[in-house]
């Protein structure tokens, strides 16, 4: 039996009767019925092009009529052309949802296909489910993006979160850490003065226009020269032998007019759906991304700027393969912009932290690069190993001070705390040590003076410290400690931890330091170190020190080799704290 067509006289008469009773126009009543019908309905013409979507269909699928009306449906269910051919209703899938298909007839002639989504009967319930799903995605993004303070890890988490739930491919490009604010897209150049009033208003307007044109041309040149770094890429299943999504870690320049370039310049998401091959080539950010997009069969793009504190720091570019969806909808764009905005703040925190770490590390390296020169009768070797971005730059430091009568004072310390402030305090401790050491006091009195001077400084951080005074003429080491780990004495047969009376850390103002004396021999080497060498999270300090005392290294070999062997044996693969080492040995005197 043939289904009742839309043009049957019985339906027409019912609509005419209803419109007369309701005192409304018949066509207006028809439009209202279709628009407010709580069932998702769409119409395709005989060439399977989109011709109509009712409001419920738009709500259920998130598709915008302006994006698809007049376009051919992407890979429709095989049942659709069969329904058009023989008029028999069938079920299948459409836009990724279960659907019923019926042939639409007017005046007995086929005019298209009616698409009905059974799940759209309750638009309010569908809207509620979408809101719940949106909040669930935002919560999942907050949990999965920004788990560390490493910018590259944050970018990788953002790309991984987007694939495959939102896109087939995802790219994250960021501005380099050292990019000044004035170089960022959409940022006005600093020092741009307001135009001065001109005596001739017409001439003043002309000057303003010329100035605006010059400024626009300069900004366009800056944007074309802007170099970003591809921080992360993620892609769904690709064909065997297909290229990777895009090389990560290298520099990229976005093509002018690409969705990524526009998103950065305009500070808003830019979408491009159902693209031809030529359009795709023009809108993809760069050549590597184009190769990956072509390999994956991409025809939809979305670029979302990563904006934090009012300035762009990068861009997220997403791509969907042909047939995977009807394109990036307004709802998709809004949701992804929210996720990208939260990720941008997290990324900005990580980038600021990384800058602070870089500054502290460079300062620390500069301060430790040139310790004081010892007397020629003493050999020295030193190492400094930063913990890296996984932890924080600490305040480890060491120093050597040349004293009269062939003596050399060695110091190893660790300022409490981390970052730039700890590195600055480290510099303060070193300069104060040199000042006090010039008084030619014994080690325990040097610590006493240091403690008193640092305690007077309101913002100075406490620090542990161990001093070792080498006196080759008397063949002795004199040692004193302010809360520091014990020095190690490497002999031909063992590694001994020297028992030094331990006083409180410097800067407390408590005082109470004592010293001890150890024999200085040419076949012994003294090792000073910071806690990063031996301490492990959750491990008793005695166990940590026992590992050091069990170390067997040749005390008479090159000191650099001794330090390398110590680090190879004791330093963890992923150091949780900085490590500083200072080794000393008296030089052999020719007989």
Image (spheres, grey):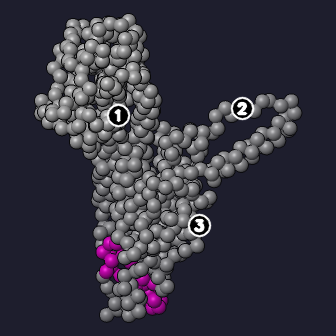
- Would you say the magenta stretch is mainly helix, strand or loop? strand
Residue 263, given in percent of the width and then of the height, sits at: 54, 53
Of the residues tagged 3 and 2, which is closer to the observer? 3
Comparing 572 with 477, the one in front is 477
Comparing 371 with 290, the one in front is 371
Work out whether residue 323 can be spotted: yes
Of the residues tagged 1 and 2, which is closer to the observer? 1
User: What secondary structure is found at the residue carrying circle 2?
Assistant: loop
Comparing 230 with 587, the one in front is 587
- Confirm whether the magenta stretch covers residue 109: yes
The residue beneath circle 2 is 194
Residue 433, given in percent of the width and then of the height, sits at: 37, 14
**Which callout, 3 or 2, points at the residue further toward the start of the chain?**
2
**Label 3 vs label 1: CA separation?**
52 Å
Please say if 444 is above or below 326: above
User: What secondary structure is found at the residue carrying circle 1?
Assistant: strand
**Residue at the (62%, 58%) spot, across then down:** 256
Q: Which residues are magenta?
A: 92-115
- Confirm whether the magenta stretch covers residue 189: no
The residue beneath circle 1 is 383
**Residue at the (29%, 47%) spot, across then down:** 143
User: What secondary structure is found at the residue carrying circle 3?
Assistant: helix
The residue beneath circle 3 is 282
Q: Quadrant where the C terminus lies?
A: top left
Please say if 461 is above or below 225: above
Work out whether residue 9 can be spotted: no
């Amino acid at each position: 039996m043939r289904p009742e067509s839309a043009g049957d006289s019985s339906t027409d008469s019912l609509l005419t009767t209803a419109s007369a009773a309701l005192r409304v126009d018949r066509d207006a009543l028809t439009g209202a019925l279709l628009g407010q019908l709580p069932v998702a309905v769409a119409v395709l013409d005989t060439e399977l092009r989109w011709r109509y979507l009712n409001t419920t269909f738009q709500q259920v699928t998130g598709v915008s009529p302006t994006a698809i009306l007049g376009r051919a449906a992407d890979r429709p269910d095989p049942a659709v052309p069969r329904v058009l051919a023989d008029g028999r209703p069938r079920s299948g899938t459409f836009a990724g949802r279960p659907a019923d298909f019926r042939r639409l007839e007017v005046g007995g002639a086929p005019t298209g296909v009616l698409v009905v989504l059974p799940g759209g009967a309750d638009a309010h319930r569908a809207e509620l489910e979408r809101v719940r799903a949106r909040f669930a995605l935002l919560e999942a993004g907050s949990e999965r993006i920004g788990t560390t303070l490493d910018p590259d890890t944050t970018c990788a988490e953002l790309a991984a979160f987007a694939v495959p739930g939102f896109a087939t491919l995802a790219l994250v490009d960021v501005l380099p850490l050292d990019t000044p604010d004035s170089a960022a897209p959409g940022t006005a150049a600093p020092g741009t003065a307001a135009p001065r009033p001109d005596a001739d208003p017409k001439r003043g307007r002309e000057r303003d226009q010329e100035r605006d044109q010059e400024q626009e041309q300069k900004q366009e040149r800056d944007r074309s020269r802007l170099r970003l770094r591809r921080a992360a890429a993620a892609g769904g299943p690709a064909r065997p032998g297909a290229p990777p999504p895009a090389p990560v870690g290298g520099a990229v320049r976005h093509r002018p007019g690409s969705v990524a370039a526009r998103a950065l310049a305009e500070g808003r998401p830019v979408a491009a759906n159902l693209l031809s091959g030529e359009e795709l080539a023009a809108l993809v950010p760069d050549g590597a991304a184009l190769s990956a997009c072509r390999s994956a069969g991409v025809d939809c793009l979305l670029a979302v700027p990563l904006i934090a504190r009012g300035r762009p720091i990068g861009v997220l570019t997403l791509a969907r393969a042909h047939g995977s969806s009807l394109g990036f909808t307004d709802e998709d764009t809004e949701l992804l912009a929210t996720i990208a905005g939260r990720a941008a703040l997290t990324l900005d925190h990580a980038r600021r932290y990384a800058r602070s770490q870089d500054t502290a590390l460079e300062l620390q390296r500069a301060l430790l690069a040139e310790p004081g020169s010892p007397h020629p009768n003493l050999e020295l070797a030193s190492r400094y190993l930063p913990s890296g971005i996984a932890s924080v730059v600490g305040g480890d430091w060491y120093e050597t001070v040349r004293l009269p009568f062939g003596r050399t004072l060695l110091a190893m310390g660790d300022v409490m705390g981390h970052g730039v402030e700890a590195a600055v305090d480290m510099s303060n401790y070193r300069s104060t040590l040199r000042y006090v050491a010039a008084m030619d006091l014994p080690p325990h009195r040097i610590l006493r003076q240091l403690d008193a001077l640092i305690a007077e400084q309101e913002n100075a951080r406490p620090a542990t410290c161990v001093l070792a005074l080498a006196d080759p003429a008397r063949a002795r080491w004199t040692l004193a400690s302010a809360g520091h780990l014990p020095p190690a004495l490497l002999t031909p047969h063992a590694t001994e931890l020297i028992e030094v009376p331990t006083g409180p850390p410097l800067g407390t103002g408590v005082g109470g330091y004592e010293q001890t004396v150890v024999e200085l021999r040419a076949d012994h080497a003294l090792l000073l170190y910071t806690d990063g060498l031996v301490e492990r999270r959750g491990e008793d300090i005695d166990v940590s020190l026992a590992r050091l005392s069990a170390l067997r290294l040749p005390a008479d070999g090159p000191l650099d080799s001794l330090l390398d062997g110590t680090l190879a044996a004791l330093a963890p693969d992923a150091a949780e704290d900085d490590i500083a080492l200072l080794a000393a040995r008296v030089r052999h005197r020719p007989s």
